[in-house]
Amino acid sequence: MSQEIFDKAKQIQATIKAETPKTLEELEQFRIKYLGTKGLLKGLFGEIRHVDKERKREFGLLANAIKQETEAAFQQLKDNFEAAEGTESISLDLTAPAEPNALGSRHPISIVMNQIVEIFQRIGFVVAEDREIEDDWHNFTAMNTPADHPARDMQDTFYVMNDPGMLLRTHTSSVQSRVMTKTQPPIRIIAPGRVYRNETISARSHCQFHQVEGLYVAENVSFADMKQTLYYFAKELYGATKIRLRPSYFPFTEPSAEMDVYWGLKDEIDYKITKGTGWLEVLGCGMVDPAVLENCGIDSKKYTGFAFGMGIERQAMLKYRISDIRYLFENDKRFLNQFSAAL
Ligand code: DAH
């Protein structure tokens, strides 16, 4: 009788060894079949009472060994399945379409500003930047703008509350006085930056905008030097073939001029933006007034210079055919995304 039970146990052991569950589900069935509360091994342990007394211990050892083997096999298979599952979830699907990577785009103002700065850097101008909250002296007095000049009016300038000596700079010309009070000629700077004016916001004007300022002071700098430099600039930025300088007035330059570039009259839009003349006004310029040089501690008998300043928004609006200046400050992504292909 005992031998039969031993044979049965051996047989179960062999069957278990031959089992190869292939999925987690099959493994669970394996567990229920052999290790479960109503499983075959439980039954095997129950057989012990039919084993002859002198072989009970031997049978107990065998049954325990089978149980331990089976549990170990179960655990091993379970670990394997779980590890395989883990690798599956991080494994790469090389056929999956690439995730679109949303890159930012440069703001149209930055694009145009960088282009202008880069054109002047090529001929030896160096970038200069300074504060936007400026004092009255650097923005106006040093720049030869008298106390009764309309630009100083509260209607036009943002003053700092409780401190009328401080203001938001109204032009990048303030960088001229900043640089000239610190440095002796030769000076050759290009100064991009944001400026502020107390303007009613409309499609054409805003209370904040950007300018680029240029200044060249050295010995024997002439009006002809200015004209040639600005002609080079107009060719580079607009591909213009012609420029013209119209007499004008600025407190800080003498003589002063406004520069137009020849835009052409090819279509209706050209008529509109040049008001039918074919010419486009792009910047103000002039020979630095000797009084400005002296205000900043530069010997006006030894040195002369020229300066120019231009607004960026207008150039960007022309270049990209933007109809309303407010688009440039709203940061609407539908607007900004249109410049992602630009430099
Ligand atoms: N600062 C002037 C403005 O804001 C622009 C300007 C004109 C700058 C002539 C200059 C200049 O340096 O020479 O309208």
Image (cartoon, rainbow, N blue to C red):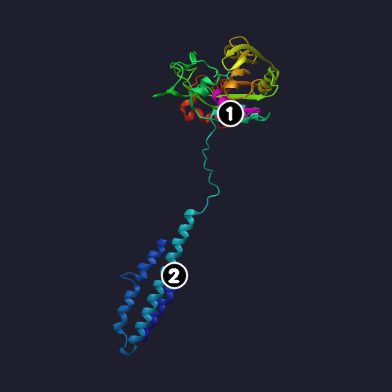
| Crowdedness near tag 2: few (<14), some (14–19) or many (≥20) residues, C-alpha within 10 Å | few
Q: Is residue 257 left or right of residue 171?
A: right
State the residue position of label 2.
19
Q: Is residue 231 above or below residue 55?
A: above
What residue sits 41% from the left and 65% below the top?
27
Query: Could one spot residue 257 in this view of the protein?
Result: no
What residue sits 39% from the left and 72% below the top?
71
The answer to which of marks 1 and 2 sits earlier in the sequence is 2
* Residue at the extreme left of the image, as rendered: 49
Q: Nearer the viewer, residue 150 or 218?
A: 218
What residue sits 47% from the left and 60% below the top?
84
Query: Could one spot residue 86 in this view of the protein?
Result: yes
Q: Is residue 19 left or right of residue 103?
A: left
Name the quadrant of the N terminus: bottom left
> Quadrant location of ligand 1?
top right
Q: Is residue 266 above or below residue 167?
A: above
Label annotation for residue 46: none
Residue 268 percent coordinates (x, y): 59, 12
- Judged from the image, the secondary structure of the residue bearing numbered disc 1 is helix
What amino acid is found at the position of numbered circle 2 in the picture? Glu
